[in-house]
Amino acid sequence: SQQGEEDPQALSIQEGENATMNCSYKTSINNLQWYRQNSGRGLVHLILIRSNEREKHSGRLRVTLDTSKKSSSLLITASRAADTASYFCATDLSNDYKLSFGAGTTVTVRA
Amino acid sequence: ETGVTQSPTHLIKTRGQQVTLRCSSQSGHNTVSWYQQALGQGPQFIFQYYREEENGRGNFPPRFSGLQFPNYSSELNVNALELDDSALYLCASSPGTFLNYGYTFGSGTRLTVV
């Protein structure tokens, strides 16, 4: 079974709008990462947030982490057509060596 | 600085055959992990190699095996292929085993078993 679950499974927005997706996980983590995947190709690392951090920004991306609720959110502001992709959260369990991925959120940005 | 390179990009094999997938890690990265991604799902951890030794393994049968070479490149071997092995196989490198930084992924090898 997968550690993380993204919500919603799919999201369709107009160019210029914001996109928000959520990730819930089950057990304690060291950090949580977000990745983007275009059309079934390789994953691109977007942002890493450590368990002692609550919010992190990178360009148009904002990630929050609530360890008490075991959840994270990824916000993409002012979306562009190039943001069309699948987004995955991945958790690093404490003292583990692997990333556990959710099933992803598919985002479509309409021109 | 080069990224992670995987070969081949696409492959079609017959059930029962064996396959070898290759990965060149990013310069300076000594750890390679392999993931299997079935259609519509997230990647699943297969195993990790650190300095030529297997450093951890996911829930995959022994017919999935790997190697890491002194230059930190890696191979994934799958014997006795089954139809369910059809997937995108992703290689990821990192500068160490501790996951305090993001992985660098290759573009993957799309394996189809018929």
Image (cartoon, coloured by chain):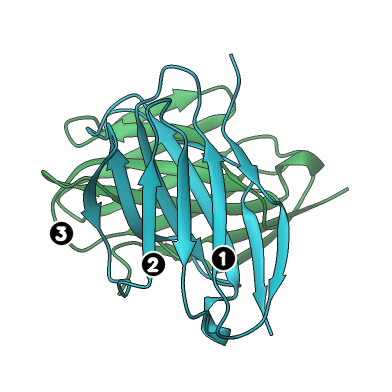
Q: Is residue B78 above or below residue B1?
A: below
Residue named by callout 1:
B19
Display colour for chain B: cyan
Q: Find out whether the residues at labels 1 and 3 contact each other: C-beta distance under 8 Å.
A: no
Name the spot of residue A45 as percent of width and height, x first.
Answer: 50, 35
Q: Residue at left 16%, top 47%?
A: A96
In which image quadrant can residue B106 be found?
A: top right
Between B52 and A9, the one nearer to me in the picture: B52
Q: Residue at left 47%, top 68%?
A: B78
Between B56 and B101, the one nearer to me in the picture: B56
Name the spot of residue B60 as percent of width and height, x first.
Answer: 32, 71
Amino acid type, callout 2 = Phe
Residue named by callout 2:
B64
Q: Is A66 left, or right, of B67 in this rendering?
A: left
Amino acid type, callout 1 = Val
Q: Is residue B38 above or below residue B69?
A: below
Output the chain of dot 2.
B
Output the chain of dot 3.
A
Mark 1 and mark 2 lie on one chain; the one further toward the N terminus is: 1
Name the mark on residue A27: 3
